[in-house]
Amino acid sequence: MDNAGIEKPLKVPETPPIDDIPVALRDNPVVESQNRLKPAWLIGGLLGLGGLAFIFGMLLGAPAPNSKVISSEQTQPRPTQSSPSATETQPPVRTLLGHFAYEEAPKSDLEPISSDSRLRLRKVAAKKFQEMVGAARQSGVILVPISAFRSLKEQQHLFFDIKAERGQDAKTRAEVSAPPGYSEHHTGYALDIGDGKVPATDVNPNFEHTAAFKWLQANATHFSFEMSFPRNNTQGVSYEPWHWRYVGDQQSLETFYQAKKLGVPSPESPVRSP
């Protein structure tokens, strides 16, 4: 058969590809977004690793549960605070010619201890003194009050008027009588005691040889009385076996022992506080 009359189909040349990525893939939006997210993944990964490293470091550096964290403030030396000295915490010492200062007892708190009501003590001291007198009588000893509470006015007379009358200087007079404001008798807790059977020993060192003094030495503390000025007392006052004081409650104890705590006077010569 003659094929001369049959037309042969035209051969279309193939179009060369634009690039190596197929068209279907080049036009896919998912692939394009994945390509755009690659840098973000890289940055996020680096930040994540950095965060993990920071947390891991914190865990390694954290103190143990029972350990004590010492701050820089604790390691700094603290300034030392010196305690106040005695002169800063105590009032000024008030002494005069070897005698301590005492306040005058209120008249309303005084009670008679003598039959004529002339001699008085504070109520609590008066009661104990009367009990002591009664106990001494049961032993055949007679305790007699010679002097008790004295006002500032009475002490002024005893010190200044008698000093002038006898021509004594202040120092000499202070050896036998305290200046006003500096006598234990102002307190209403102190008194001079004598032996009713031996009045010649009143306000005299020889009182120590009487039965009254010996009884007081053995029994006075049971009634809260004590001798104010024994031999070689720290106050430097001369020996007065007849002078006793009541220290049986808080106020009386503080009255005498707070005064002693203030300081010990250093008289140039022994003094008395009658």
Image (spheres, grey):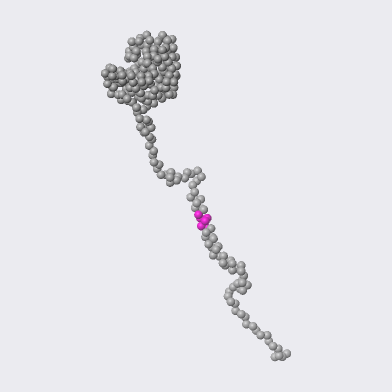
> Closer to the camera, 171 or 195?
171
* x 28%, y 23%: residue: 268
> Closer to the camera, 23 or 73?
73
> Residue 34, percent across and down?
58, 66
* x 44%, y 14%: residue: 131
* x 49%, y 47%: residue: 63
* x 37%, y 19%: residue: 150
Query: Is any atom of residue 222 visible in this view?
Result: no
Query: Is any atom of residue 11 visible in this view?
Result: yes
**Is the residue 18 above or below the residue 93 in the image?**
below
> Closer to the camera, 20 or 224?
224
Which contiguous range is marked in magenta? 49-54
* Residue 84 painted magenta: no
> Residue 267, percent across and down?
30, 24
> Residue 264, percent across and down?
33, 26
* Quarter residue 79 falls in: top left
* Quarter residue 118 falls in: top left
* Residue 52 painted magenta: yes
Magenta stretch, overall SS: helix
Side (left or right) of 13 relative to 105? right
* Quarter residue 85 falls in: top left
